[in-house]
Image: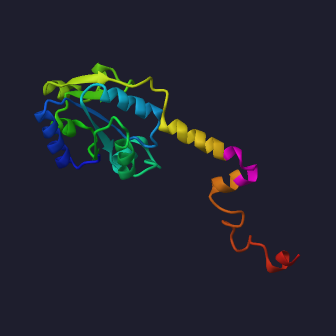
């Protein structure tokens, strides 16, 4: 379920009151793919409850560049929340998850295999409050950027050279001509 930060704090307090442990994972999750699913499954295995922090649109644009995110934060959060092993999702706009980690103090902060325990940026924060770091998921051979590139190539394969040139220029064949370049009425009558 997608929660506000205050709702998340309340949910974590209820879980802790009955002895449940908390894992935390985070990411952009722009175009959910199998690598994301495996990362979140690994994170869920680390504790009784899994919180997932989803970057807001502004932070995704800053991290991933122009044209991203593909989906708005509310959609990405809803998709992640629909995964069976995810308990809570929260959207955040901070440049890092440090503030959220201090807010909920998860027992385990989970990062993907592109990190080592030593290279996790939030390591000092987590160990400072007594939590631990877990590296989870499969090898990083899945990426949203690669999926987008494949989609673009697939779309490109079905077009003629003239169609590609026209679409790449972002105009039809008559757009961009000046009035003296436009076909005259006399030429159109032929």
- Quadrant of residue 86 within the rendered picture: top left
Residue drawn at point x = 38 percent, y = 39 percent: 83
- Is 23 placed left or right of 73 in the picture? left
- Residue 87 located within the stretch drawn in magenta: no
- Is 27 placed left or right of 154 in the picture? left
- Outermost residue, front direction? 18
User: Which colouring convention does the figure follow?
Assistant: rainbow
x then y, percent, for residue 55: 33, 44
Residue drawn at point x = 41 percent, y = 34 percent: 36
Is the magenta region chiefly helix, strand or loop? helix
Residue 189 visible in the picture: yes
Magenta range:
156-163
x then y, percent, for residue 85: 33, 34
Residue drawn at point x = 13 percent, y = 33 percent: 18
x then y, percent, for residue 166: 69, 56
Q: 53 or 89, which is in the foreground?
A: 89
Q: 31 or 167, which is in the foreground?
A: 31
- Is 147 placed left or right of 97 in the picture? right
Residue drawn at point x = 75 percent, y = 49 percent: 161
Q: Please, is residue 184 above or below residue 95 in the view?
A: below
- Residue 162 located within the stretch drawn in magenta: yes
Q: Please, is residue 180 above or below residue 112 in the view?
A: below
- Quadrant of residue 43 within the rendered picture: top left
């Amino acid at each position: 379920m997608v929660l506000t930060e205050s709702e998340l704090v309340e949910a974590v307090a209820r879980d802790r009151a009955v002895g449940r442990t908390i894992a935390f994972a985070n990411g952009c999750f722009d175009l959910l793919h199998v690598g994301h699913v495996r990362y979140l499954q690994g994170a869920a295995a680390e504790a009784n409850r899994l919180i997932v922090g989803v970057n807001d649109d502004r932070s995704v644009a800053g991290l991933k560049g122009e044209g991203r995110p593909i989906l708005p934060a509310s959609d990405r959060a809803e998709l992640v929340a629909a995964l069976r092993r995810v308990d809570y999702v929260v959207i955040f706009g901070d440049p890092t998850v440090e503030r959220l980690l201090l807010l909920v103090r998860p027992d385990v902060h989970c990062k993907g295999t592109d990190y080592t325990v030593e290279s996790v940026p939030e390591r000092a924060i987590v160990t400072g409050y007594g939590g631990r770091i877990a590296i989870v998921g499969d090898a990083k051979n899945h990426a949203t950027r690669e999926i987008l590139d494949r989609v673009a190539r697939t779309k490109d394969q079905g077009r003629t050279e003239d169609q590609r040139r026209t679409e790449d220029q972002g105009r039809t064949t008559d757009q961009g001509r000046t009035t003296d370049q436009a076909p005259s009425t006399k030429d159109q009558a032929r």
